[in-house]
Structures are given as structure tokens and as C-alpha cells.
Image: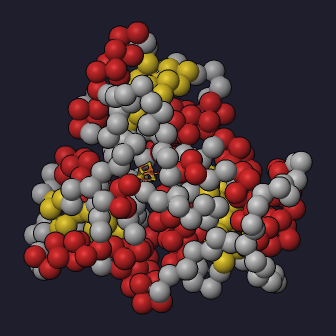
Amino acid sequence: MFTAVSSPTHVSELPDDLFEAIATLKRELNAIVLAHYYQDPDIQDIADYIGDSLGLSRKAANTDAEVIVFAGVHFMAETAKILNPNKLVLLPDLDAGCSLADSCPPDAFAAFKAQNPDHLVISYINCTAEIKAMSDIICTSSNAVQIVEQIPTHQPIIFAPDRNLGRYVMEQTGRDLLLWDGSCIVHETFSEKKIVQLKVQHPEAEIIAHPECEPPVLRHADHIGSTTALLQYAQTSHSPAFIVATEPGIIHQMQKEAPHKQFIPAPPMNNCACNECPHMRLNTLEKLYLAMKYRTPEITLPEAIQVAALRPIQRMLKMT
Ligand code: 13P
Ligand code: SF4
């Protein structure tokens, strides 16, 4: 349906109306644009589907589109490719990685797994394809509890790579999990002290937090959940205001869904914008347009990894 062309060397040819140009390319390529909530508002607005990691995986598994343009980070686009080995999967910026995925190098994880051969391996989807290929079941923040609850209680479990989500799952299920010591640079940056100060200034606000946050922050949360769960809670709760302890990109959808409510981003420890994911924010509308125009950068994976990583993802999709 399309032919491969060479990569762009410069960006001087950008059209005046990027929204219109992207819509035209979507039709020409028979492409779908999938975006995570942490993307820039412009990208969210041109996406065909916006969701959390589970929603995005489900959408990638079920799409008829020939080309998947993934406005998210590398592990998400890899998951789409694993589910669609014969489709072209584009990531606007190949450097859009993930500190959490990086905190679990395949060699070290293989050794950890070898030391605990009787353990079932449940890995959070925020990991590389190599780690997925070494896992028994994948989970996301919206189904991790549900998946662990389905495993017989006598079965020991390794949970990787996020120690905070792992601890949260342990609390919710009462199970003892062997945790990999990884974390997300965005969610570990929130300041408990500043959140408590904000709550004093806004006593009407509820604190809503992603389970990747550190325990001192989660202790103050009125509601904990995946990005989709937080968005749904913000819509249905009667509170007029929310202190949002996750990447603030999601506030764009919260404001759209509940325009009369107030959403306050939880502050980081330092006076920086480090509550914004530096990886997610590498994608821009311009890069997305160029990726579609030149059909690159493309996600590719060694076949053995692709095949081995598919099984634990399929198990997750069947289990929840
Ligand atoms: P969810 O969207 O699945 O809640 O994950 C958040 C996240 O950190 C994605 O990188
Ligand atoms: Fe990775 Fe954290 Fe960014 Fe999500 S927010 S992509 S876990 S670094």
C-alpha cells in the first residue's frame, strides 16, 4: 500500500497546517495514531485513541489499520509491534525511552531470574521486549492486582521492574512478591511535603496518585490507580478539585472531561519541570508528521524476542 522512502535530513518542509497534513497522511497510509495521556496536548488532540498502557495494548491488538503511529515511549511501541509483527509501527522519536524500563537491564534480570528458578515472573509492561521475553505474564498498572490474585498462593512470584507498583500490589493482595528494585524518575520525584502543603491550601481537593509513586506519597492518596483509572475517578468523584500525582499530561483530558473542576499538578521536590516525563515529551507534532511522511523511525525487533515476548502479553490480555 505504501513504499519506503529515505529519512528526512531537515525539517524546513513542514506544512502550515500540521493537523490537516497529519489527517491526510492518516488516510493515505491507512494509519492509526495511538497516544498515551502523557503526550503533549496537541498530540492527544490528533490521536485516534488515547489511553493507558492496557487500553493502548488492547487497541493495538485489535486495529485494522496498516500502520500504527505510536505517540508514546519505546516499550509501548515495541508492544504494538510484538502484537503486529507484520505491520509498520512508527515512533516519532526513537530516543523516547523510559527510565523504569532502563532500570532493568536484561543480563542482570536473567541472573536474578536464574537465582530464583521456582518463581513465576510477572513483569510490568514498562520494560523492554527482552524482559518481556523472559516473563511469564505481563501486567499494567490497571490489572496488576487482578493478575496476581489469579496466581495460586503457593506459587512464588518475581515482580519487575517497578518496586513501587510491586509494593502496592503486595499491600492490595497480601502476597509476598520478590521485587526488582526499579523505579520511574517522574513518579519518584513528587514531594510529600509540598503535596501536604497544597492539601492545606486546598482542603476541598482530593489527592489522586499513580501506583508508581513512592509510598510516602501514596499514603496521602484518596485514590490510587492507572492513568485511565485516575481520569475516571476525577470524572465521577463529587470533589471540586484534585491534586494529581502523576505526569501532568493527563490533566489535558481531565480538564476536557470535567471542565468545571480544578486539577492541580503535584509538585516535584526541586523547582524543575521534572514531573514531566522527559522521554514522553520528546515526541512532538512535527516529529509525528515527519514520521508519517517518511515512514520512519520504525520499530523493529529480532524475531526470537518478538515471538517469546508475545506469549506473556497474550496471557495478560486473556486474564483481564
Ligand atoms: P499507565 O498509563 O498504564 O497508568 O502507565 C503510566 C506510565 O508510567 C506510562 O509510562
Ligand atoms: Fe517511563 Fe516514568 Fe516516563 Fe512512564 S512516566 S514512560 S514509567 S519514565
- Residue 299, percent from left and from top: 57, 74
Point 51% across, 71% down: residue? 78
Residue closer to the observer: 308 or 156: 308
Q: Quadrant of the N terminus?
A: bottom right
Which quadrant holds residue 289?
bottom right
- Residue 59, percent from left and from top: 60, 65
Q: Is residue 244 visible?
A: no
Give the farthest residue toward the bottom.
304
**For residue 52, above or below residue 25:** above
Q: Is residue 82 visible?
A: yes
- Residue 25, percent from left and from top: 83, 65
Residue closer to the observer: 228 or 80: 80
Give the farthest residue toward the top.
201
- Number of numbered discs on residues: 0
Residue closer to the observer: 5 or 192: 5
Q: Quadrant of the C terminus?
A: bottom left
Point 34% across, 20% down: residue? 194
